[in-house]
Image (tube, grey):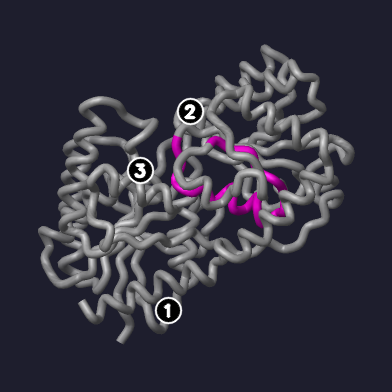
């Protein structure tokens, strides 16, 4: 008999958690695992991954499960989850993202039954989101829930260490599952540039991510301005949208920065194949899938030393980890812009590292093994 797995995530907006969950829904053997995906709705300024990319993945939508907080809507979503768990009687309840982690695990507790309760921390809210009493409240809630969760998954080493240091769960509850991605098709750089109408001779540095405060697009523009000040021959490509999209575009135009905004894209593999360098400027991260994609493309990465980025970027070997200061990031870019051999060397090592640690097959095997252990609970 197939193991029944209920995947619960607040919303499937374009981003790492949605990619991971969609790959689990597609990739696990349907003869062994009967999966059901429960999710909410994306905000108006977000692209829905199920509608734009993973159109083959089926989901049950619950209004109120999305990101926004509303006591009445949240209560209705919670009661819907309780009823669904009681009806479906899953063997595994696997929650993803903060809000779904709270509502889903509370619903699992109230519904009862012997399901293995698993929660994945795709990052955490300890840095860069809240301050003061709000952080303390987040920690208190997560401590309470961790004590009632069988397995806690962290997507990166530093994410795990940060959570343990905050007193959230016990070390023996944790497992680190690196996200896995299928290796992209080999794409010739010049062919990719022609398809994207890019200059064959320019040096392109690409940022892929939501244009939201935590991702710090303002810092990216500060880096671009610093590169202009250093007279670096570099052009920035930005793939993604969000609440800071229009504001960021307006500033780039106003300051005449070498930045092109591409909006939401579904051809990220091709975009990285056309690029020379990848960059991220976030205040906080879990383990960003876009940087794994960049590594698979064989290009060096410049990123701040935050979250579990260090699991992907080995400083000085596959790219450069810097402080969050724009000047430090511009210095790292300068070293890469002026040395083609260095770009090639770091990119090649990065690709080999990604192929070893971030394959989709490994991620699926890790999850399958965990779910199979639910039968021994």
Where 230 falls versus 142 (above or below)? Answer: above
Where 172 falls versus 162 (above or below)? Answer: below
Q: Residue at the location (82% across, 33% down)?
A: 338
Q: Residue at the location (27% across, 51% down)?
A: 101
Q: Marks 2/3: CA distance?
A: 21 Å
Residue that label 2 marks: 243
Residue that label 1 marks: 30
What is the crowding at mark 2: few (fewer than 14 residues within 10 Å), some, or many (at least 20)? few
Q: Which span of residues is magenta-colored?
A: 284-304
Secondary structure at badge 1 equals: loop
- Residue 72 placement (x, y as % from top left): 17, 38
Name, please, the residue furthest toward the top: 254
Q: Which mark lies nearer to you, 2 or 3?
A: 3
Residue that label 3 marks: 124
Nearer to me, 84 or 22: 22
Residue 238 is covered by the magenta coloring: no
- Residue 108 placement (x, y as % from top left): 17, 60
Q: Upstream in the sequence, badge 2 or badge 1?
A: 1
Name, please, the residue furthest toward the right: 201
């Amino acid at each position: 008999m197939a193991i029944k797995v209920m995947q619960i995530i607040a919303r499937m907006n374009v981003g790492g958690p949605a990619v991971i969950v969609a790959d689990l829904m597609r990739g696990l053997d349907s003869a062994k695992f009967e999966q059901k995906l429960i999710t909410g709705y994306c905000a108006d300024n977000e692209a829905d991954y199920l509608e734009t990319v993973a159109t083959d993945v089926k989901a049950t939508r619950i209004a109120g499960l999305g990101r926004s907080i509303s006591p009445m809507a949240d209560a209705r979503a919670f009661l819907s989850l309780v009823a669904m768990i009681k009806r479906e009687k899953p063997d595994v309840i696997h929650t993803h993202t903060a809000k779904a982690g709270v509502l889903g695990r509370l619903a699992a507790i109230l519904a009862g039954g012997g399901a293995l309760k698993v929660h994945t921390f795709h990052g955490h809210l300890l840095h860069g989101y809240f301050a003061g009493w709000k952080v303390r409240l987040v920690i208190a809630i997560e401590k309470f829930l961790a004590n009632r969760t069988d397995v806690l998954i962290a997507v990166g080493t530093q994410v795990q260490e940060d959570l343990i240091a905050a007193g959230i769960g016990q070390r023996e509850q944790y497992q680190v599952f690196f996200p896995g991605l299928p290796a992209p098709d080999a794409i010739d750089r010049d062919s990719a540039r022609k398809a994207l109408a890019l200059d064959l001779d320019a040096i392109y540095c690409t940022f892929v991510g939501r244009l939201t405060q935590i991702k710090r697009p303002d810092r990216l523009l500060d880096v671009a301005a610093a590169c202009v000040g250093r007279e670096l021959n570099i052009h920035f490509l930005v793939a993604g949208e969000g609440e800071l999209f229009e504001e960021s575009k307006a500033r780039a135009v106003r300051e005449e920065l070498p930045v092109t905004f591409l909006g939401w894209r579904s051809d990220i593999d091709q975009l990285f194949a056309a690029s020379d360098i990848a960059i991220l400027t976030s205040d906080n991260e879990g383990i960003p899938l876009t940087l794994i994609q960049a590594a698979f493309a064989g290009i060096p990465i410049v990123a701040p030393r935050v979250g579990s980025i260090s699991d992907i970027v080995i400083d000085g070997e596959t790219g450069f980890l810097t402080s969050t200061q724009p000047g430090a990031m511009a210095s790292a870019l300068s070293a890469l812009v002026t040395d083609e051999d260095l770009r090639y060397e770091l990119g090649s090592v990065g690709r080999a590292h990604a192929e070893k640690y971030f394959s989709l097959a490994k991620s699926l095997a890790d999850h399958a093994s965990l779910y199979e252990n639910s039968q021994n609970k």
